[in-house]
Image: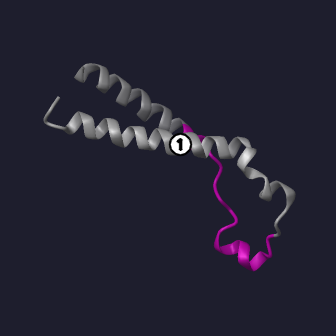
Amino acid sequence: MKTALTIIFIIIAIALAILVLSQEGKDNGFTGSFTGSVDTYWSKNKKHSKEARMQRATAILGALFIIVAALLSSKFM
């Protein structure tokens, strides 16, 4: 059981690293308020974009990573 969880943990870690590294940076942070960034059609409908799916997958894999790490470190295994 512990071997299977370790393999799953490694797969999740690799997938999480690939997802995080493939995401674009956020440029509209603090400087966006000075440059006057405008709400466009694209910015209002980002929840259906590829970036939104990647962010959702990153959040899910991050949660799974924490859960599997907690299971591996528990004394019940």
- Residue 75: in magenta span: no
Q: Residue at x 83, y 69 (%)?
A: 38
Of all residues shown, which one is farthest toward the right? 41
**Residue 13 appears at what percent x and percent y?**
42, 35
Of all residues shown, which one is farthest toward the left? 75
Q: In the picture shown, does residue 29 fall above or below 14? A: below
Q: Residue at x 59, y 46 (%)?
A: 55
Q: Dot 1 corresponds to which residue?
A: 58
For disc 1, the neighbor class at 10 Å (few under 14, some 14 to 19, many from 20) is some
Side of 29 where 6 appears, left or right: left
Q: Which of the 4 image quarters holds residue 29?
A: bottom right
**Residue 49 appears at what percent x and percent y?**
74, 44
Count of all numbered marks drawn on residues in the image = 1
- Residue 34: in magenta span: yes
The span picked out in magenta is: 19-37
**Residue 53 appears at what percent x and percent y?**
65, 41
Q: Nearer the viewer, residue 60 or 7?
A: 60
Q: In the picture shown, does residue 32 fall above or below 23? A: below
Q: Residue at x 78, y 76 (%)?
A: 35
Q: Quadrant of the N terminus?
A: top left
Q: Quadrant of the C terminus?
A: top left
